[in-house]
Image (cartoon, rainbow, N blue to C red):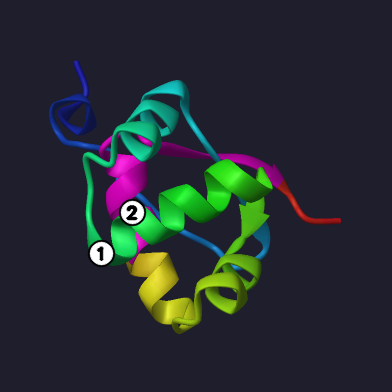
């Protein structure tokens, strides 16, 4: 066994990727189970479909750094996943 199997995979969020809501994230967005900026990011992605960090930031009016931090948490929770790289 490798030691790395016992540690959680590091979550990275890049500005050149597109992120989409998972089925669990869609449920959370619909149920309003989150609040504040986390909910705004999920709701934005639920309404607009897969989005880039800059698209989300522009849509809800927060910095790209804040969006990246929120996405990192949402990815770790299983609410969001990276769906593709931008061309």
Along the horizontal axis of the image, is 81 left or right of 39? right
Q: Which of 73 and 41 is in front in this view?
A: 41
Distance in Å between CA atoms under marks 2 and 1: 6 Å
Asked whether the residues under the numbered discs 2 and 1 touch, taking CB atoms below 8 Å apart as contact, a structural biologist would say: yes
Q: Which residue lies furthest to the top in this view?
A: 1
- Asked which secondary structure carries label 2, the reply is helix
Q: In which quarter of the image is the N terminus?
A: top left
Q: Where is residue 78 in the image (x, y as percent from the top left)?
A: 33, 32
Magenta highlight range: 70-84
Q: Nearer the viewer, residue 27 or 74?
A: 27
Q: Where is residue 6 in the image (x, y as percent from the top left)?
A: 13, 27
The image shows a total of numbered marks equal to 2
Q: Can you say whether 55 is above or below 32 in the image?
A: below
Q: Can you say whether 59 is above or below 74 in the image?
A: below
In this figure, which residue is indicated by the disc labeled 1? 36
Question: Would residue 3 be counted in the magenta stretch?
Answer: no
What's the mark number on residue 21? Answer: none
Q: Which of 24 and 30 is in front in this view?
A: 30
| Residue depicted at x 32% and y 34% | 28
Q: In which quarter of the image is the C terminus?
A: bottom right
| Residue depicted at x 55% and y 42% | 46
Q: Where is residue 55 in the image (x, y as percent from the top left)?
A: 65, 68
Along the horizontal axis of the image, is 42 left or right of 70? right
The crowd level at tag 1 (other Cα within 10 Å; few <14, some 14-19, many 20+) is: few
Q: Residue furthest front?
A: 31
Question: Would residue 79 be counted in the magenta stretch?
Answer: yes
| Residue depicted at x 59% and y 71% | 59
Q: Which residue lies furthest to the right in this view?
A: 87
The crowd level at tag 2 (other Cα within 10 Å; few <14, some 14-19, many 20+) is: some
In this figure, which residue is indicated by the disc labeled 2? 39
| Residue depicted at x 41% and y 79% | 65
- Asked which secondary structure carries label 1, the reply is helix
């Amino acid at each position: 066994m490798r030691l790395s199997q016992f540690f959680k995979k590091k979550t990275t969020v890049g500005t050149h990727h597109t992120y989409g809501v998972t089925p669990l994230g869609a449920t959370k967005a619909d149920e309003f189970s989150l609040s504040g900026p986390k909910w705004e990011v999920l709701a934005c992605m639920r309404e607009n479909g897969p989005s880039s960090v800059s698209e989300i930031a522009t849509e809800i009016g927060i910095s790209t750094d804040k969006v990246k931090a929120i996405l990192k948490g949402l990815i770790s929770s299983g609410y969001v996943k990276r769906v593709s790289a931008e061309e």
